[in-house]
Image: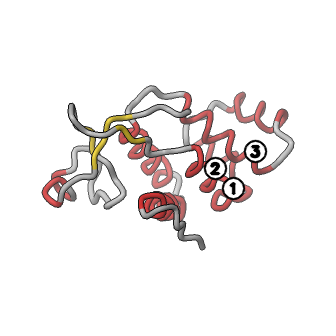
Amino acid sequence: MGLKAIVKQPTDNEMGSGCTLCEGCEATHRKSVSGGVQEREILTDKILYKLATEYVGSTWHDVGMCLGIPAATLDLIEKNQESPKKKKFEVFRQWKMSSNKPENIKLAELKKAFYDCNRQDLVTALEELLSGEATGGKFLTQ
């Protein structure tokens, strides 16, 4: 299983300008708290797989570079994974395993990496997937 973080759904007062992680935070964003809240994994393998296989397209190598995956690792993924879907997902798996940061920080970093690489479409897709997961798995797809 993936790493877990202690998170809660932010209240209206915690959203927007009060967010400690990013400006213009979305409803799918979770804020870390200490003590007495339920444990929840935000970036599940299910969400990352769907993002990788349905939204990344043939630019998986570029996305990997944006996520800070070393070129040598991307070359190994290219060599060792036969399926295009497995290559795309492996990029996200490598990225997720490379950090021991809390889930909410990973989410903010993932969105920032997508923005920095002019892939706002992936930010939108990620937010839709997270929203779908929060509403019982009814994913919104393009």
Labelled pair 2, 3 in contact (Cβ < 8 Å): no
Mark yes or no: residue 120 visible: no
Query: Which residue is at 38% across, 33% downward?
Result: 102
Residue farthest to the bottom, as pictured: 142
Neighbourhood count class around disc 2 (C-alpha, 10 Å): few under 14, some 14–19, many 20 upward: many
Query: Which residue type does callout 3 highlight?
Result: Lys
> What is the secondary structure assignment of the residue under circle 1?
helix
In the rendering, at what x and y percent does residue 21 appear? 28, 45
Query: Which residue is at 83% across, 33% downward?
Result: 80
Query: Which residue is at 25% across, 39% downward?
Result: 37
> What is the secondary structure assignment of the residue under circle 2?
helix
* Residue hosting label 1: 53
In the rendering, at what x and y percent does residue 134 appear? 42, 59
Query: Which residue type does callout 2 highlight?
Result: Tyr
Query: Which residue is at 28% across, 60% downward?
Result: 24
Report the Cα–Cα distance between label 1 and label 2.
6 Å
* Residue hosting label 3: 86
Query: Which residue type does callout 1 highlight?
Result: Thr
Q: Nearer the viewer, residue 136 or 63?
A: 136
Neighbourhood count class around disc 1 (C-alpha, 10 Å): few under 14, some 14–19, many 20 upward: some
Q: Quadrant of residue 12?
A: bottom left
From the viewer's perspective, tell me whether residue 33 is left or right of residue 103: left
123, above or below 71, in the image: below
9, above or below 39, in the image: below
Labels 1 and 3: the sequence-earlier one:
1
Labelled pair 1, 3 in contact (Cβ < 8 Å): no
Q: Quadrant of residue 82?
A: top right
The label on residue 49 is: 2
Q: In the rendered view of the protein, which quadrant contains the C terminus?
A: bottom right
Labelled pair 1, 2 in contact (Cβ < 8 Å): yes
Report the Cα–Cα distance between label 1 and label 3.
8 Å
